[in-house]
Amino acid sequence: MQRLVKATIDLRALRRNFAHARRRAGRRQVWPVVKADAYGHGMLEVVRALADADGFCVADLDEGLALREAGVTQPVLVIQGAHSGAGLAAAVACGLTLGVHGPEQLALIEKDAPKLPAGSLRLWLKIETGMRRLGLEAEEALEAQDRLSALAAVAELGMMTHFACADTTDHPLTDAQITEFGMATLGAKGPTSVCNSAALLTGCYRRDTVVRPGIMLYGASPLLGRTADGLKLAPVMTLRSRVLAVKEVPAGHSVGYGAAWTASENTRIGIVAAGYGDGYPRHAPSGTPVRIGACDVHTLGRVSMDSLTVDLRLAAHVRVGDEVVLWGRGLPVDQVATAAGTIGYELLTGVSSRVPREYLGGEPG
């Protein structure tokens, strides 16, 4: 491994966060969300570490098929569902559970269901309750229940929705969505799933049978104004690199592309081997926190593709080769995200494929 930048994935921390989700869920099943390569952490490594999960959730069919090819036997919910007859057939062959969020998918299923073995289809209706993204309106969902229940191929018919504002405690839209979902699921007998990480941690809804934690498993906060540490979540990914060079910038001279930062005094700087080509946000402004050893420093000027610059005026001890933490243990990803004007989700999922992943604690415990 020759690259100086690397992402260390602590699977022990992942399992601790999962255990926390399990405690919050009570008797409900816990299906971790592992879409987008498990939020940049490595989907297959994450599902192996969470071998005692009740099921898993992914975004699309390719992700679901990859889990089956890797030997995952638990239920796998493909939230976006199938979009063709071939996709529907592949899902049935692999025993995947498919989301149904629109009339086109409903028509596809009704068209192809007679060709499928009895009891081979597991479907969850996505109910539109206020997110205004994907989902059937409440009246459409009630009609879809009747139509799909009449098909011999359908073995399971679940119901799910997604909160728009669960990251904000006591948001009125959350209450409205809960009411809407209750109306749409009156008399439903299959599984129900409402809670994401934020809802699971706030406890705003407890009547579903399956919860879908995502970002909390990876050690970032899903709640506005609440830190991951305060929520008893441990960072799973630590993005590290090393100092490539140390130099002095004379007063009046600028640093980096666009001369975006100019030294007001003679300034000692460090060049760190990490940039937007690795997934560090290019839009991170001067002042974004970075940690070198036990010392907190901050960025200067624009982030380059392969490097970024940090201010070493208060870190005279730093030398070439010293380890740098860009986020993770000792520097929460949410803190970096806030400074960069984004969210932890984007930073974690944005770590590029050229960054080696190093896994710690691989044996499930």
Image (cartoon, rainbow, N blue to C red):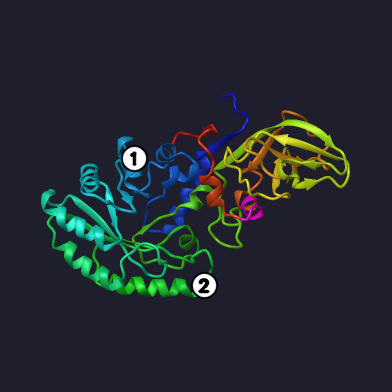
Label located before the other in sequence (2 or 1) = 1
215 sits left or right of 242 in the view: left
Amino acid type for the residue under numbered disc 1? Leu
Whole-percent x, y for residue 285 in the image: 69, 50
Tell me the distance, in whole angstroms, between the alpha carbons under discs 2 and 1: 36 Å
308 sits left or right of 363 in the view: right
Q: Is residue 253 above or below residue 225?
A: above
100 sits left or right of 167 in the view: left
Can you tell which mark lies on residue 170? 2
Label 2: few (<14), some or many (≥20) within 10 Å?
few
Magenta region's main secondary structure?
helix
Whole-percent x, y for residue 216 in the image: 50, 52
What segment is highlighted magenta in the picture?
336-341
Quarter of the image for the C terminus: give it: top left
Provide the secondary structure element on which disc 1 rests: helix
Amino acid type for the residue under numbered disc 2? Asp
Q: Residue at x 42, y 66 (%)?
A: 131
Label 1: few (<14), some or many (≥20) within 10 Å?
many
Q: Which residue is mark 1?
A: 67
Residue 108 in which image quadrant: bottom left
Q: Residue at x 24, y 42 (%)?
A: 94
Q: Residue at x 83, y 41 (%)?
A: 253
